[in-house]
Amino acid sequence: MRLLLFVILMSFFLKPGFAHQYEGTAYPLYYGTIVRIIDGDTLVVKLDLWPSITGKFSVRVRGMDAPDIRKVDCENERIWGEEAKNKVIELYDPGSKVRLENVVLDSFGRVLADISRYRSDRWLYLKEELINRKLAVEWHPNMKDVPWCLLAETR
């Protein structure tokens, strides 16, 4: 129900024909509060959708992949995934304010967005923060699964 409300509200902000130009309609900009961290690339965010209307959504970080912590191929992947999750908790602790840009629904119905936090003079993007710390890799649709176990051996 919340997802339906989210999609309906987002449609008010689009220009006619905009949705036909892109494969996942991108919604411009939203602000919210971190509720909890699921793993290195998925956060639960309470979004401010409209005055007095909020929604809580699980949001994946667009354009990156972090090691998993549940369905893993080796123990090193789980350990690496825990490191990524702990860094996200450190940087984006529950209650902190975030900005979501380029919000879309992917082919599986998941919410994807560029997630950032404000630090004194600029917005810092979670994707860049984790990739720069070697806790995630850049990822694009149609890429094969990341070989985390193999990468862990060269870490």
Image (tube, rainbow, N blue to C red):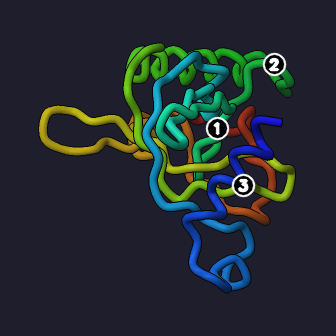
Tag 1: Cα neighbours inside 10 Å, few (<14), some, or many (≥20)?
many
- Provide the residue designation for mark 1: 59
- Provide the residue designation for mark 3: 8
Tag 3: Cα neighbours inside 10 Å, few (<14), some, or many (≥20)?
few
Q: CA distance from mark 3 to mark 2?
A: 33 Å
Q: CA distance from mark 3 to mark 1?
A: 18 Å
Specify whether 108 is left or right of 59: right
Q: Residue at x 59, y 54 (%)?
A: 103
> Given the image, on which type of amino acid does mark 1 rest?
Val
Q: Residue at x 65, y 40 (%)?
A: 60
Specify whether 111 is left or right of 15: right
Q: Quadrant of the N terminus?
A: top right
* Residue with the most extreme left position: 121
Classify mark 1: helix, strand or loop. strand
Between residue 150 and residue 25, name the one nearer to us: 25
* Numbered circle sitting on residue 17: none
> Given the image, on which type of amino acid does mark 2 rest?
Arg
For marks 1 and 2 on the same chain, the one whose residue lies earlier in the sequence:
1
**Residue 102 at what x, y percent from top left?**
53, 59
Q: Is residue 72 above or below residue 105?
A: above
For marks 3 and 1 on the same chain, the one whose residue lies earlier in the sequence:
3
Between residue 155 and residue 9, name the one nearer to us: 9
**Residue 83 at what x, y percent from top left?**
54, 17
Q: Nearer the viewer, mark 1 or mark 2?
A: 1
Asked which quadrant contains residue 79, the reply is top right
Q: Quadrant of the C terminus?
A: top right
**Residue 133 at what x, y percent from top left?**
41, 34
* Numbered circle sitting on residue 70: 2
